[in-house]
Amino acid sequence: MQTSYTQDPIDGLPGQISSSYLHKIETRIADGELRAGLYAIAGTSEKSAKHPTSDFTSTPQKALGIVHLDPSYVLPEGATAVVYPDKKAVSIIRTGKVWVKPEAEHPGALPAPDSPVYVRTTAATGKPAGSLRATAGEVRDELKITVTSSTNGAEFEITANGEDLSFTSGDSQTAAQKASAWAAVIDGKDGWSASASDAVITVTHESGFIEVDEGSVGEGFTYQVVQGQGSAIAVLLPGAFFRRNGTNGVSEVELQAFDD
């Protein structure tokens, strides 16, 4: 008998219908693998569906909807996501409200309620085509460090994303030379990239997110974290909106919401 309950139950799984709101669902044949909760477009043959590719940008008429989660589908052993195989009959949610697991610009971030929906057409590591997000381009944080000290053996202390990026410079170096040497050290750390121009170091992290730890900053330099908008990797879905955020990283998307 269950005697305890979590205060944060899961609202839904990607691809689940989120309410009794009117839905339009149609059956398509998978043109390649299809993953529940991701967006699908018309495939290469009649009545087929596939995840978006770059050509979706110029052929918006191919838009279909979100791959529905079939509760009767038996997952293969060890599977962590519902992936339907090629040629399987799959339900596509064309209109209605459905749970998805959106891409987040930063760890723990979720789309703002009533923000527009974009669908990824360019896949990246851990970010498959068909993922839903709130921006057309990837936002990447950049840490800009400007070296101001030319003191021999200057110690520059800074921690970002919980990692120590500090550096002790050599002697008889200008600020620009110190910046170049410091950038090389940061660039050698796993997940980090850095380059120097004059006395300014530009630092990025593979996650796209940088947070400088409070109280970790020393002297001899200044810094700021700025956001840079990358190239477009997603296209806007007309009439689609993120309506609310749930628990465990899911958000509710409403498709074809023209009549509100």
Image: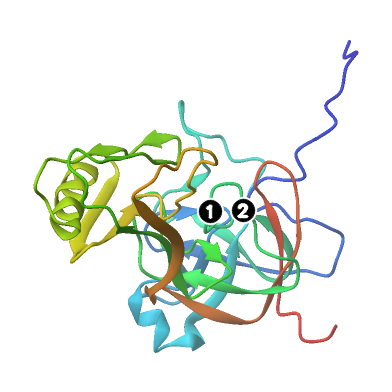
Label 2 CA crowd tier, 10 Å (few <14, some 14–19, many 20+) = few
- Describe the element under mark 1 as helix, strand or loop: loop
In this rendering, does residue 35 appear at all?
yes
Q: Nearer the viewer, residue 32 or 36?
A: 36
What residue appears at the point 53 percent right and 59 percent down from the top-left corner? 38
Looking at the image, do the residues carrying marks 2 and 1 touch, with CB atoms under 8 Å apart?
A: yes
Residue 56: image location, x then y, percent = 41, 80
Apparent side of residue 162 relative to residue 96 in the rendered image (left or right):
left
Q: Nearer the viewer, residue 208 or 82?
A: 208
State which quadrant residue 1 falls in: top right
Above or below, 163 relative to 23: above
The Cα atoms of the two marked residues, 2 and 1, are separated by: 5 Å
Residue closer to the observer: 30 or 191: 191
Quarter holding the C terminus?
bottom right
Image location (x, y in percent) of residue 42: 46, 75
Three-letter amino acid code of the residue under disc 2: Ala
Residue furthest to the left in view is: 172
Residue in the image at 17% along x and 60% along y? 176
Q: Which residue in the protein does label 2 denote?
A: 109
The residue located at (39%, 35%) in the rendering is: 163
- Across and down, in percent, residue 172 comes to 8, 47
Q: Which residue is mark 1?
A: 106
Q: Taking 30 as reference, is 178 left or right?
A: left
In percent of width and height, residue 17 lies at 74, 56
Q: Is residue 168 left or right of residue 96?
A: left
